[in-house]
Image (cartoon, helix red, strand yellow):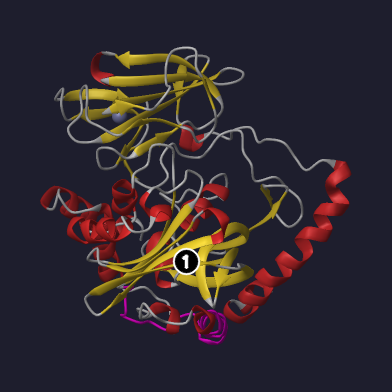
Amino acid sequence: MFFAKTPILDFLTRHLPNLSPRLRKGLFGLLALPLFGGVAAFAIAPDTDTDGMLRETVTSTITLPAATPTEIAPLDFWREERVLRGDTLAGLLSRLGVAAEEAQRVIAIARKHPALNKPQPGRTILARVSAGGQLLLLRHLGDKQRLVSIQRQGDALTAKDEIIQLETRTLMRSGVVNTSLFSAMDAADVPDHFASQLSEIFSADIDFHRDLKEGDQFSVLYEAQFYNGQMVQTGNLLAAEYVNGQDLHQAVRFNSRYYTPTGRSLQRAFLKSPMAFSRISSGFSNARYHPVLQEWRAHRGVDYAAPTGTPIRAIADATVQFVGSKGGYGNLVELQHSGAYSTAYGHMSRFGKGIRRGARIKQGQVIGFVGQTGLATGPHLHYEFRINGVQRNPLALNLPTSVPLEARDRAAFNLASAPLSDQLRLIRGHNLSAFD
Ligand SMILES: [Zn+2]
């Protein structure tokens, strides 16, 4: 089912190259017909009281039968961007999916609001944006609890600047996956970055490129800060659950890491994929017809198709062994991990910041961006996993796991995780009696 959408992705990528990723995703949403019942699947007017939304979402996701088909796709999305060093408001608005003309209006408004005009690194901007790139609302909390918000009323955008008192709440959301985790989470009003985070947390057990099944279900519990009933920013993902076919996967947060409710660490030595979201366009094989060289050749790596510029992540902590151009690989990064393990990433359009020979790299760090340098028919990542220098099929390997929960943390863990698993069970109990 995940693959079912790839012809559409191909079509959109080929025929609508100028489409923003946001709009492209919006179109997927429209094509996706998510199987998600209830209020959360409807577009919410920008001035909807979030307090009301919270109640609606919790009750509707719990009481509606899980398999109520609906053809209502999300028409707008919650997005949240963290301000990075060197970010401009224009760059942030573009990442939030705000269309160019609309962004100009926001930038003009922001000139009167210094906190928004020059957002501080580490802070966030929360926005609700239509599939067409129209800004419905924006909230940015600056220093000293100063909230700048912009709200759409008809065609007018009005700004408010105020000192506020925040209130933290825990939100519960759940939904059914029909085409992709992103569209399912959009339909449930969950900000996008939680979809990436959930897929990351379960990446050792679920390959979100290959394993998604129609009817899969997710549940998430996350913190969010509210003011006057309106969400200002989100906080940590406290617990998550993903039902993949017949398999139940759960994670709870403890000491900034994720564990199963029984205390197995979900932090892995190796990520399952160097791409957060993309598709495998060519697997590992000992012989295949090479489209560029027009001959049969072994393909001792895995190809991930993704638009040029998509970030590529280091699958484990490493030292950079090679950065530069190398024959058919084009722009290549080779990483040496602990033990006998190394990985290689080819066809990059450009390298990540600070990626030079000998540099120490953290797991998940962006080492470069998808391109089609070297021998490549289209933009994709050629990824190789090597043991003692020999390419192996990463999808068929059982890679080592990482640090378990320490014995002295066990009691504290049990205390912290029990209420979280209870809440997950509450959501699931209403949707999936089969798992009880
Ligand atoms: Zn390849």
Quadrant of ligand 1: it is top left
Q: Determine whether 193 is above or below 357 in the image.
A: below
Residue sitting at x 55%, y 21%? 337
Along the line of sight, the residue nearer the viewer: 151 or 293? 151
Q: Determine whether 9 is above or below 213 in the image.
A: above
Task: Report the residue marked by disc 1.
Answer: 190
- Residue type at mark 1 is Val
Residue 294, position as x, y percentages in the image: 14, 25
Residue sitting at x 21%, y 76%? 155
Does dot 1 land on a helix, a strand or a loop?
A: loop
Along the line of sight, the residue nearer the viewer: 161 or 381? 161
Q: Determine whether 432 is above or below 233 in the image.
A: below
Residue 412, position as x, y percentages in the image: 84, 53
Instruction: Quadrant for the C terminus, please.
Output: bottom right
Is residue 23 something one can see in this rendering? yes
Residue 82, position as x, y percentages in the image: 46, 49
Along the line of sight, the residue nearer the viewer: 334 or 311? 311
